Amino acid sequence: MHDIEPHYHWLHLYTSEEDEYSPFFEQEHSEFEFSQTVYNYLIHPQWDSFGSPTLYLKILFVDYEAESAIIELIGEWNDVIQNDVMVLKRSIIEPMIDKGIQKFVFLGDNLLNFHAAEDAYYEEWYNELEEGWIAFVNFRPHVLEEIKTYKIDYFLNFGGELDAVYWRKLSPQQLLDKVGQIIERRLS
């Protein structure tokens, strides 16, 4: 897992460490010191910690005018033991909503597991988005099954075309446009 880096092809467009509104503003990363782990596996030092011992992320792109953010995940999302959704919402999502972000794209290619508990924080998050949405792109089938089992799917957009987005070949704006179009078709 230490070889899996956050997507870096958009660094010339956005870095969360240089965004004064980012929860990771002025954070410094080592290129050589591997100290963060998901269980017993070291992960690349470019991933950002937000308080969960098993889930890490990287804010890849934010467009404040379009009220949109793209966030890549790695590890295990565990609401049962860690209450990751609460930690994520309080430390990352709420500050972003306060700065006007209403549309969240989460990239789940490197999310290994998901353990849901209840839907209260997902519902709260959903209700705080005036005209926005939450999209899970390229999440693994067993992760999506867990989401469906706990009926969190009411608050999230995932599956279907969102599971086949080749986002690494797109620009951030192309990805946001594509996900937005998929969601708009679903709503109409």
Image: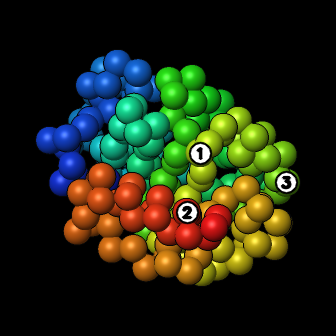
Amino acid type assigned to the residue bearing label 1 in the image: Gly
Q: Nearer the viewer, residue 18 or 79?
A: 18
Amino acid type assigned to the residue bearing label 3 in the image: Glu
User: What is the x, y in percent for residue 111?
Assistant: 51, 64
Answer left or right for 122 relative to 175.
Answer: right
Q: CA distance from mark 2 to mark 1?
A: 11 Å
Residue under numbered circle 1: 132
User: Quick one: SS at disc 1?
Assistant: loop
Q: CA distance from mark 2 to mark 3?
A: 27 Å
Question: Do tag 2 and tag 1 residues touch (Cβ < 8 Å)?
Answer: no
Q: Nearer the viewer, mark 1 or mark 3?
A: 1
Q: Earlier in the sequence, mark 1 or mark 3?
A: 3
Q: Earlier in the sequence, mark 2 or mark 3?
A: 3
Q: Earlier in the sequence, mark 2 or mark 1?
A: 1
User: Quick one: SS at disc 2?
Assistant: helix
Query: In percent of the image, x 39 and y 55: which residue is there?
Result: 176
User: What is the x, y in percent for residue 162?
Assistant: 50, 72
